[in-house]
Image (cartoon, rainbow, N blue to C red):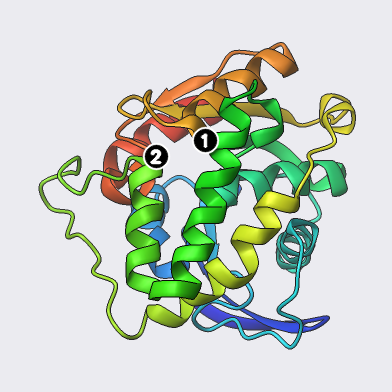
Amino acid sequence: MKESVLEVPGARLHHFVRGTGPLLVLIAGGHGDAAVNEPLADHLADRYTVLTYDRRGLSGSTTDEPGLTLATHADDVSRLLSTLTTEPAYVYGSSIGALISLEFTIRHPEQSGVVVAHEPPVTQLLPEPERTRAVQDLLTAEETFKAEGAAPALRRFAKFAGIDPTDREPDVEVRRTGPEQLPNVEFLLTYDVPAIRAHTLDLAELKGSPARIVPGVGENSTHVWPHKCARLLAEELGTAYETFPGGHNGYAFRPRATAGRLHQVLND
């Protein structure tokens, strides 16, 4: 595995490359950094060259420009990929990572191969009053953070996303949010969650992308609104959605099964 730091406008992107085969970038959800994707990457490295990274503002990726948009994150993915290949790459993103992958597909279609967007929070697709409730979920997490701190806010976040720590593979250890992770949670709630609320996906541009876009859903997350967002996105694009193991964060709790399913979807 190769560890590097890439200097980009306003930030330094800490990233890792492992394995051999077609290039696949993994974009974590929530306050997840490269370490969250490490088990999934390890299960894919026998078939793919896997790129994982800390989003700007998280862990080893520092930033001088924290007031950012999802377009900023999408451009970061583009710059990372440009150091590794001139060919279209595979992309797998979950939650905010899925929304970033979709924005990346719009902004950098020439770099986009198969793009799997697992439960992206595309709130604009939800009918009312579900849309208002979804936006309020995000806003409540932000307000809880300001009033009570990171840990209570993260619990609110986990509740509306339906995170179930018991829904995991036997050898997966639940990653506790220790002091070293609190800055990531704080950055998520201060900058990234407002960016999600403010974001509008250009559906016309997305439909015109040459990439194969695959909305993904968790088999155990039918009760949460990001699951419905993915189904509605598939309907909007006139394509089928694919089901993945586990819930909203199945990539972290069920990495072995997710790797197998992702390989099937990428090569369908």
Q: Nearer the viewer, residue 185 or 204?
A: 185
Name the image quarter holding the C terminus: top right
- Locate residue 248 relative to residue 72 in the image: left or right: left
User: Which residue is rendered at x = 58% and y = 51% of the image?
Assistant: 97
Residue 64: quadrant of the picture: bottom right
Query: Does residue 32 show up?
Result: no
In the rendered structure, which amino acid carries the disc numbered 1? Glu
C-beta proximity under 8 Å, tags 1 and 2: yes
Q: Where is residue 144 drawn, in percent x and y?
A: 44, 65
Q: Nearer the viewer, residue 218 or 45?
A: 218
Which element is circle 2 on? loop
Neighbour tally class for label 1: few under 14, some 14-19, many 20 plus, Cα within 10 Å: many
Q: Where is residue 194 drawn, in percent x and y?
A: 66, 60
- Locate residue 236 relative to residue 228 in the image: left or right: right
Q: Where is residue 175 drawn, in percent x and y?
A: 25, 65
Q: Nearer the viewer, residue 261 or 188?
A: 188
User: Which residue is rendered at x = 30% and y = 45% of the image?
Assistant: 163
Please tell me which of labels 1 and 2 falls first in the chain: 1
In the rendered structure, which amino acid carries the disc numbered 2? His
How far, Cα to Cα, is label 1 from label 2? 7 Å
Q: Which residue is mark 1?
A: 119
Query: Does residue 56 show up?
Result: yes
Residue 135: quadrant of the picture: top right
Vertical comparison of 55 with 245: above or below: below
In the current view of this chain or complex, which residue is farthest to the front? 147
Q: Where is residue 2 drawn, in percent x and y?
A: 51, 76
Q: Which residue is mark 2?
A: 248
User: Which residue is rendered at x = 50% and y = 74% of the image?
Assistant: 146
Residue 215: quadrant of the picture: top right
Which element is circle 1 on? loop
Neighbour tally class for label 2: few under 14, some 14-19, many 20 plus, Cα within 10 Å: many
